[in-house]
Image: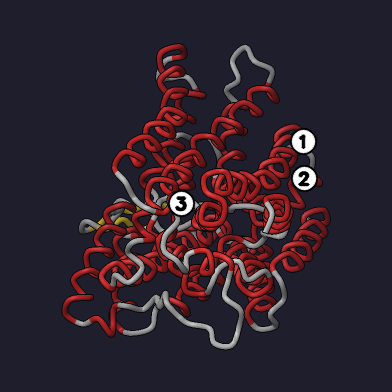
Amino acid sequence: MSFREALIVWLRVAVLSFGGPAGQIAVMHRILVDEKRWISESRFLHALNYCMLLPGPEAQQLATYIGWLLHRTAGGLIAGILFVLPGFLSILALSVLYAGFQELTIVQAIFFGIKAAVLAVVVVAVLRIGKRALKNAYMYMIAAASFVAIFFLDVAFPLIIFGAALIGFLGSKFNPDKFVVIKGHQSQVGVATPTVDAMLHEGPQDHMRPTIARTVKIAAIWLMLWLVPLVGMLMALGSGNVFTQIGLFFSKLAVVTFGGAYSVLAYMAQEAVQNYGWLAPGEMLDGLGMAETTPGPLIQVVQFVAFMAAFRDAGELNLFMAGLLASVLATWVTFVPCFLWIFVGAPYIESLRDNKALSAALSAITAAVVGVVLNLAVWFALHVMFGEVNVVNAFGFKLQVPVIATIDIASLILTVGAFVAMLRFHVGMLPVIFVSALLGTAWYMVA
């Protein structure tokens, strides 16, 4: 397999990567495991298990991991960057349109329908992840505890994920049959040996052997690429500048948000809307709609959030130039850590392919993610369906109570229709969003 062939395949993966992490991982599996036979099922799932443990977008990290397996650091960079690039360009164009023409009725009308469809997409994601992860009562209990902790008690994301990992680790010692849910070592009979497995037949390649010296070198390079720009902005612009805030916030996001793209979105949406005031809840859903309908990682919505934040606080800069710079900054600090996690951790993970305790921890984390994503779905539903939501604190619980009189019947009908189309009739995500946008536009224009 030539490097040129790999470049073409990774570009194809990137362009076809619609539909959030579940759809993107399915595309990679179909092309890399089934069609190209680059990597075996067991190695693919082992890499995926590790990426699910990391903060940030697991699909982009999985692409980077497999690219690294095949062609060392250069392969990881090509796979990871190409996975992001189409989405970055698409959302940048949509952000310019949204910021410049948001007040136009037609733009408002289009996104009115998209919001309802995106809510249905998130609900379906909860069901799909749950079907894969919740295989027994233990996993259901972890998911339920995760939802209660985050929705009612405001427990931090990292604590939930680390707590789930600890439960999974302990469970592997006392009841491994119930806790090792993610099976990462399935064999395939009667087919040719995949490229990576054939390459490793004689033992690990040099770049796959973990060494302290190489780890320190790689970590130093990527930490400098990540942190030096942040320190420079903090010294030159101060902590109150919008660019400094964007850099620091999305850097923190890259570290503390475990459990995949939807859990990242839950944390980001609440912070960007409630803490920083960069966006309204409806605008956050508009951004998520952009990310759902463009190729690449769902977390690429970070650049829309950053674009709008800088556009509204541009200072002496041109509004659109401020948005462009903020988009680049948010993308940089979001994805540079992803390369750090893979290039530093992958050699060690390759040496732990048969560790049952790690698999059990990953299984419990996946179950906890179901609760986290359910929190995101409920939070979005409240702000899509109702014009006003009150927060009530009682007995240590935080209750979000919608004002029934502010319910939006049109949004409710569109959401239910999108949900039924996807779940009952198995209509694809893009057609559902397209039709919802058309129906929402028609309703909005008439009403």
Left or right of 296 in this view: 335: left
Q: CA distance from mark 3 to mark 2?
A: 27 Å
**Residue 293: quadrant of the picture:** bottom right
**21 to the left or right of 427:** left
If you read the primary sequence from the N terminus, does the residue marked by circle 1 or circle 2 appear first?
1
Please tell me which residue is depicted at 43% across the width and 23% down the height of the picture: 228
Find residue 264 and name its label: 3
Give the amino acid at mark 3: Val
241 with respect to 350 (left or right): right
Look at 57% across and 43% down and name the residue there.
74
Corner quadrant of residue 308: top right
Q: Earlier in the sequence, mark 1 or mark 3?
A: 1
Question: What SS does tag 3 mark?
Answer: helix
Whole-percent x, y for residue 66 in the image: 54, 58
Is residue 361 depicted above or below 212 in this figure?
A: below
Please give the residue where the numbered disc 2 appears in the rendered image. Answer: 107
Distance Cα–Cα, label 1 vs label 2: 7 Å
Give the spatial CA distance, label 1 vs label 3: 28 Å
> Relative to 53, does residue 131 appear above or below in the rendering?
below
- Residue at the extreme front of the image, as rendered: 202
Name the element at disc 1: helix
Residue 120 visible in the current orientation:
no
Q: Tell me whether the residue at label 1 lies in contact with that at label 2, contact meaning CB atoms closer than 8 angstroms.
A: yes
Residue corresponding to mark 1: 101
Quick check: marks 3 and 2 in contact, CB under 8 Å?
A: no
Query: Residue sitting at 50 percent across and 55 percent down?
Result: 65
Using the rendered image of the protein, determine whether residue 309 is visible from the camera's viewpoint: yes
Considering the numbered disc 2 on the image, is that residue within a helix, a strand or a loop? helix
Identify the amino acid type marked 1: Phe
The residue nearer to you, when weighing 429 against 400, is 429
